[in-house]
Amino acid sequence: EPEVTQTPSHQVTQMGQEVILRCVPISNHLYFYWYRQILGQKVEFLVSFYNNEISEKSEIFDDQFSVERPDGSNFTLKIRSTKLEDSAMYFCASSVIDPGREGPDEQFFGPGTRLTVL
Amino acid sequence: AQSVAQPEDQVNVAEGNPLTVKCTYSVSGNPYLFWYVQYPNRGLQFLLKYITGDNLVKGSYGFEAEFNKSQTSFHLKKPSALVSDSALYFCAVRDANDYKLSFGAGTTVTVRA
């Protein structure tokens, strides 16, 4: 069964450093998402991406964050200058069709990247 | 704004007994409701969804959920729990005009042999 994959599984970085989290969505999916879960808190939406542009973002997704689909398979989340409070599990997800217009479809999640900022 | 509440942090049941995990939601438009399960070191796995139609929806691994519009609830159920059902369960909601999922805090289910 096709799966969303994420690398690395665990990333440790120093405060102020840039990190790139990588995801390979399911191949025929068109919508891509990033969520995060700070330890002990809810899973929170960060951003959705369709047709090479951001379709929606939360207030968490400020100028320090960016997303990119550099080729036909990868989807990346970049944090330009990490802060201690960015420490969290970051989940990538993808879905087949446009959930806003053609009806909802479930999102398939990757296993997550645990980001630790020291 | 949309939100989900899972009132129980933990649910403990004996194997073979029925399992219920509670979820209530708040959304401005028509709700699209989902249940996901997370096993240790794994991503969120989709279990089932309610979009429209029958209030009782059936999903993977023998799970089902009942949509109750008047109570704004979407409780997850399984008639006979297995030890292997022990995991973290998340309820999520989407507004019909939105892209993002809003998750509950999660309920840890422990099924004892």
Image: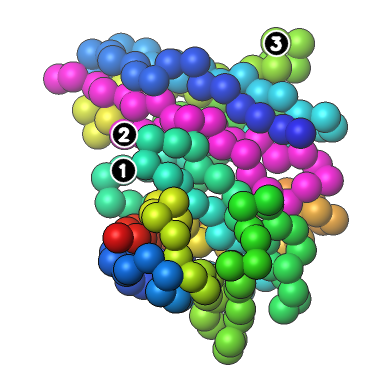
Please name the amino acid that badge 2 sits on.
Ala
Label for residue B71? 3
Is residue B110 located in the magenta-colored stretch of the structure? yes
Please name the amino acid that badge 1 sits on.
Tyr
Say which element carries label 3: loop
User: Which residue position is annotated with label 1?
Assistant: B39
> Is the Cβ of the residue at disc 2 closer than 8 Å to that at disc 1?
yes
Say which element carries label 1: loop
**Image-quadrant location for residue B94:** top right
Q: Is residue A70 left or right of residue B79?
A: right
- Chain of the residue under the numbered disc 2 shown in the image: B
Up/down of A56 relative to B31, above or below: below
Image quarter (top left, top right, bottom left or bottom right) of the C terminus of chain A: bottom left
Q: Is residue A79 left or right of residue A6?
A: right
**Image-quadrant location for residue A71:** bottom right
Q: Is residue B9 left or right of residue A45?
A: left
Is residue B92 visible in the rendered image? The answer is yes
Which mark is first along the chain, 1 or 2? 1
Up/down of A48 relative to B89, above or below: below
Residue at point 65%, 61% (across, down): A62
Say which element carries label 2: strand
User: Which residue position is annotated with label 2?
Assistant: B87
Label for residue A54? none
Q: Residues within 10 Å of mark 2 (few under 14, many from 20)?
A: some
**Image-quadrant location for residue A114:** bottom left
Discs 2, 1: same chain: yes
Q: Which residues are magenta?
A: B87-113
Which mark is first along the chain, 2 or 3? 3
Image quarter (top left, top right, bottom left or bottom right) of the N terminus of chain A: bottom left
